[in-house]
Amino acid sequence: MRQLFEIFYQLIERTSTDFIRYLYNEIHWESRLIAITGARGTGKTTLVLQYIKNNYTAYSSEALYASLDNIWFTTHSLLDLADEFHKMGGKALFLDEVHKYPTWSIEIKNIYDSYPDMKIVFTGSSMLEIHKGEADLSRRAAVFHLPGLSFREFLDFEYGYKTASFPLTELLSRHVEIAINIGKSLKPLVAFKEYLSFGYFPFYKEDKQLYHEKLLATLNTILDVDLPATERIDYYSIGRIKKLFAILSQLVPCIPNISALSKELGVTRISLLNYLFYLKKAQALLLLDKEASGIKQLAKPEKIYLGNTNYAYALGGDKTDIGNVRETFFFNQMQVKHNITYSSKVDFTVDETYHFEVGGKNKTKQQLSGVNNGYLALDSIEIGFGNEIPLWIFGLAY
């Protein structure tokens, strides 16, 4: 156990609190059992270490962080750790990468029930379903999901420019004022172009030149490692899922032909829909549905997009379609706080109330004719007017 504390102390020493993700202030840290899910590279580990650094005495045994893929757990159980930690006077246990530990859910439930004075915070893959483990923790745990950086967070992370997030109603009514204020400090269109290419995952700062290569390698690891750790799926199916993603990445945004895709992959319709569902959970794809009814595993999506704009540039390079990028950005940013659904008249409907067409600065209002609460989200404009709103403004939603 000493080696776990040594690693923990070293990690805390290296953890900066200069930039903190938006979710930090939304998590109910007072809860006894907290789950934080998110794709690889979104910053879950850093978020947890920042909380420990800000709230517990340095180098004490009050709190302990441990990654469950550590070799220590090949000869010790999670229950062993909790028991020994509790006897030392431990108060808060932070467990990372729980999906790497086969019996994580039942052991966390046992710890929760056996040590009522201990706080447990655990993180896992975006594919982790808290209610699907051997022990259903959904009724006990406060669950939070960490997406990639918003454009607003990128402005802070890359440029040190801090601005509040805004609810959609304010983005629609105050967009001119917001744009003018931000424009006094930086050039939003320059920053926006950077963000679209490399600003979604915080690890871009490690090496911008190799970011796209690492991004695709990370996605590969999600499908090779995280997917089998959270779903009962064989190697054959993983190969088919990768092929499906490769096919769709050349077509997006697209209205999927499920029959044709099933035939090309040599799988059943149900298997194909399951594969789409897995790619959505991996945040590799965004699936646009007719109705906002949560995650539906076997429903055919109306339209398919890449999970974020960085994937578009990593896969397409100089040939990346800007129309695809614009729509992907809007969907990706708005879906964190809102229900986004398909519309036969416009590109997106938000919360069944607001209707959006996304395009370049010369896009006309023709498709908004006869549409109530209709707006244009326009690229390449710094300041909008009326219901014509700069596309980048929608990156301030979280």
Image (cartoon, helix red, strand yellow):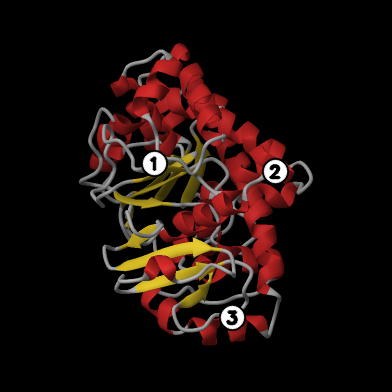
Question: Percent x, y for residue 67?
Answer: 52, 36
User: Are the residues flagged by discs 1 and 3 in contact, CB closer than 8 Å?
Assistant: no
Which residue position holds label 1? 87
Q: What type is the residue that disc 3 sits on?
A: Ile
Q: Nearer the viewer, mark 2 or mark 3?
A: 2
Q: Is residue 309 above or below residue 189?
A: above
Instruction: Inspect the image, locate mark 1, and give the three-letter code of the amino acid beneath it.
Output: Lys
- Give me the disc on residue 383: 3
Label 2 and label 3: CA atoms lie apart by 28 Å
Residue 206 x, y percent position in the rendering: 74, 48
Q: Residue furthest right?
A: 209
Residue 84 figure quarter: top left
Apparent side of residue 197 relative to residue 21 in the rendered image (left or right):
right
Distance between mark 1 and mark 2 Cα atoms: 59 Å
Secondary element at image label 3: loop
Crowding at mark 3 (Cα within 10 Å: few <14, some 14-19, many 20+): many
Query: Which labelled disc corresponds to residue 319?
Result: 2
Quick check: marks 2 and 3 in contact, CB under 8 Å? Answer: no
Q: Residue at x 30, y 71 (%)?
A: 370
Would you say residue 171 is visible in this rendering? Answer: yes
Sooner in the amino-acid sequence: mark 1 or mark 3: 1
